Amino acid sequence: MTDRLEDILAEGLSVVFCGINPGKGSAALGLHFANRSNRFWRTLHLAGFTPHELRAQDGPRLLDYGYGLTTLVERPTASAGELAQHEFKGAAAAFEQKIRRCQPRFVAFLGKAGYSALSGQRQLDWGLQPQLLGDASVWVLPNPSGRNLAFSLEQLVDAYRPLQAAIAQADQQPLTS
């Protein structure tokens, strides 16, 4: 048992998926998206990111596919709504440094709250954002939490597929320095 989640990161990933913060259950287990009601792992598979559905304990295997996981705020809560604005602001510099260090092609924020706090933008659309984070293109995707009743599994999959297509297209292009 632990009280925090370790990042699953490496240099040169295709995408880093960024949760808002860990749930208490996930942090206690030391596993990203460990709650059975969370739809992250199923969404990744159905949207074409992985050939089969991974489970929370398989998280480190995401690196095999060129994907990473992190959270914007490290403090676990029962609900992201428990976070104060100053916690987002306090986490911003370390988060940006982490992304610059790993140099992914894409960063995908899971939910609008994290990227809104980081960018200072109150109004965000889903999908590709006009700003970069370091050299990474930024995407904002619906949060896969089981508490997010605004999106069905099918709607989550539909929202994640364009990012998967962008990754596939980028993987066909050589990296430039």
Image (tube, grey):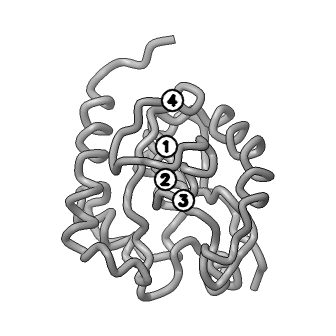
Is residue 174 toward the left or the right of residue 29 in the image?
Answer: left
Q: Amino acid at mark 3?
A: Ala
Which numbered disc, 4 or 1, marks the residue that appears first in the sequence? 1
Outermost residue on the top side: it is 177
Q: Amino acid at mark 4?
A: Leu
Identify the residue position indicated by label 1 in the image. 107
* Rendered location of residue 106, percent (x, y): 45, 38
Mark 4 and 1 residues: CB-CB less than 8 Å, in contact? no
C-alpha separation, residue under disc 2 versus residue under disc 3: 9 Å
Q: Amino acid at mark 1?
A: Val
C-alpha separation, residue under disc 4 versus residue under disc 1: 9 Å
C-alpha separation, residue under disc 1 versus residue under disc 3: 15 Å
- Depth check: give the residue in front, 136 or 119: 119
* Rendered location of residue 127, percent (x, y): 33, 46
Identify the residue position indicated by label 3 in the image. 113
Residue depicted at x 38% and y 56%: 141
- Name the image quarter holding the N terminus: bottom right
SS for callout 2: strand
Which numbered disc, 1 or 3, marks the residue that appears first in the sequence? 1
Q: Nearer the viewer, mark 4 or mark 1?
A: 4
Q: Nearer the viewer, mark 2 or mark 3?
A: 3
C-alpha separation, residue under disc 2 versus residue under disc 1: 6 Å
Mark 2 and 1 residues: CB-CB less than 8 Å, in contact? yes
C-alpha separation, residue under disc 4 versus residue under disc 2: 13 Å
Q: Amino acid at mark 2?
A: Phe
SS for callout 1: strand
Outermost residue on the front side: it is 122
**Tally of numbered discs:** 4
**Where 161 sits versus 29, above or below?**
above
Residue depicted at x 44% and y 76%: 145
Which numbered disc, 4 or 3, marks the residue that appears first in the sequence? 3
